[in-house]
Amino acid sequence: MVAFSAAALTSVIALAIGVSSGYFGGRTDEILMTVTNIMLVFPQLPLLIILAAFLGNVGPFVIAVILRLTSWPWGARVMRAQTLSIRRKEFVIAGGRRSGAVEHLDRPGVEPAAEDWLASAPLAQAERRGRRPPRRGCIMSAPLLSCRDVSVDYIVGGGTARACNRVALDIHPAETVGLAGESGCGKSTLAFAITRMHNAPALISEGQILYEGRDVLAMTPAELRASRWAETAMVFQSAISALNPVITIGEQICDVILAHRPVTRDEAWSRGEELLSMVGIARARMSAYPHQLSGGMRQRVVIAISLALRPRLIVMDEPTTALDVVVEREIMDELAQLKWKYGFAILFISHDLALMGEICDRIGIMYAGNLVELGAAAEVLENPRHPYTQGLVGSFPSIHGPRTRLHGIPGSPVNLLDLPQGCNFQDRCPARIAACARVAPHLLPAGLGHEAACHLVTPPQEARA
Ligand SMILES: Nc1ncnc2c1ncn2[C@@H]1O[C@H](COP(=O)(O)OP(=O)(O)O)[C@@H](O)[C@H]1O
Ligand code: SF4
Ligand SMILES: [Mg+2]
């Protein structure tokens, strides 16, 4: 009875906090998740001893209740992730629109103060004079970007390497979607395809990429130029190769602004200064050349440029991989604040699952060009369903819980020019079954808002027969 009532209490608290946090978002989410995170770092046992000493002679009932009162944060995080995932479902969006219940979720993460600042900025004034109406982000609207069965092939001497195989992925307004997987699994290829920055021998051989319903693959070069930076911005790993070494960073920021907005050079320059200070660089560094900045500063400059036209989607391909962990942490904190203020969506590509767990709403895992798992970040990291994801998660040390031996993934990634019949992961999979050598698995539902491509999760027809 004691255990049952205590477990019920934990569930009720986790449900109330997680669902409120995920549903209301904004300030409520921030406050509730701050409390949750603080509770997570409290060591239960010392807390229990202190409380027991404070309360005097306590019985098993009080101990059980105290234990449960401190056990809810994990459940709350899972519930929040599930709520975030469910509230983006089309049927919820449709229901919300009909009832008007989602009205308050308009402009997620855009603080009034920040918006005032944006409205007063020269660029915003120019935007009002110019072509585009002011934007309104809405986390519960239709996808901002939709990849529909996108395949990308590299036509090389030895044959055709399919680096992305029928990848289906939606990114919603203000959402951060992470993409992880070993080197060579197709993450960058997908990022280049989304932004149409791929070059021969890469070829988008099938599928559709829609940005706000517009077909990116059908855009003319002029439409693409207008869309890049203004609608979708890119931040890649090596800032030094993204910046022109013989032009000052101020001129490079101005060039991006002037190419897209009807503003004067002075207005573009002052906007550039604002952007630099937003990413923590002194305005005076506008006159610096890239080689005069550290690696971290250069990466901040690229992030500043990516924000220059307030795009709604930023594709970040391993933006901090080349930086040390301290600078990485600083940049990620600044990015989180900017995202909170301006509400843009991010496709975040990284090897670092721990970092992804902190910043992503959903995580997709790629292997050999296939999206093999997709779901709410906490769900994918804490309850991975695909053996490959389990291997990736098992390769990372956890900062919570006891020390455990890390298990890598045996073998090496499959050769894209010589794929086996059935599942691409079968040679490395510790859990393979007979059907794995015959039937290729597809990404299918594996739980609430969670999908996996594995026969263990969804047995193929032949195994069910
Ligand atoms: N320029 C290229 N020519 C031929 N094949 C390529 C080229 N770039 C990438 N590939 C192939 O595409 C696969 C995926 O590459 P990539 O998207 O860069 O992986 P990731 O970003 O996940 O490390 C690689 O394993 C390689 O086989
Ligand atoms: S389909 Fe089979 S081989 Fe592939 S991951 Fe699942 S169990 Fe392993
Ligand atoms: Mg890459």
Image (cartoon, helix red, strand yellow):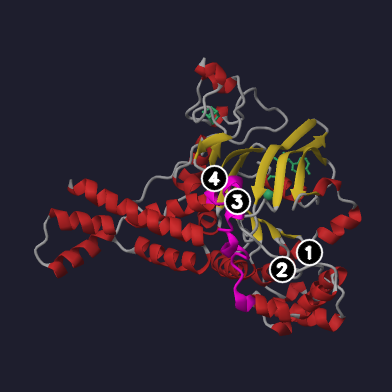
Rendered image quadrant of residue 209: top right
Rendered image quadrant of residue 296: bottom right
Query: Per the image, is 32 magenta?
Result: no
- Which residue is label 1 attached to? 230
Q: Is mark 1 on a helix, strand or loop?
A: loop
Specify the amino acid type for callout 4: Gly
Q: Residue 350: in sight, yes or no?
A: no
Q: Is residue 148 above or below residue 422?
A: below
Asked if ligand 3 lies within 8 A of label 2, the reply is: no
Query: Per the image, is 107 magenta?
Result: yes
- Which residue is label 3 attached to? 93
Specify the amino acid type for callout 1: Ala
Q: Earlier in the sequence, mark 4 or mark 2?
A: 2
Q: Horizontal and vertical percent for residue 38?
A: 38, 66
Q: Which mark is residue 307?
A: 2
Q: What element carries label 2?
A: helix
Q: Residues within 10 Å of mark 3 (few under 14, many from 20)?
A: many
Residue 95 shown left or right of residue 20 in the figure: right
In the image, what residue occupies the spot 36% across and 51% down?
403
Q: What stretch is highlighted in magenta?
A: 85-114
For the residues marked 3 and 4, what is the alpha-carbon distance in whole angstroms? Answer: 18 Å
- Which residue is label 4 attached to? 375
Q: Residue 438: in sight, yes or no?
A: yes
Q: How many numbered dots are placed on residues in this image? A: 4
Q: Horizontal and vertical percent for residue 197?
A: 80, 51
In the image, what residue occupies the spot 71% across and 44% down?
147
The kind of secondary structure the magenta stretch mainly shows is: helix
For the residues marked 1 and 3, what is the alpha-carbon distance in whole angstroms? Answer: 26 Å
For the residues marked 4 and 2, what is the alpha-carbon distance in whole angstroms? Answer: 27 Å
For the residues marked 3 and 2, what is the alpha-carbon distance in whole angstroms? Answer: 28 Å
Furthest toward the front, the residue is: 99
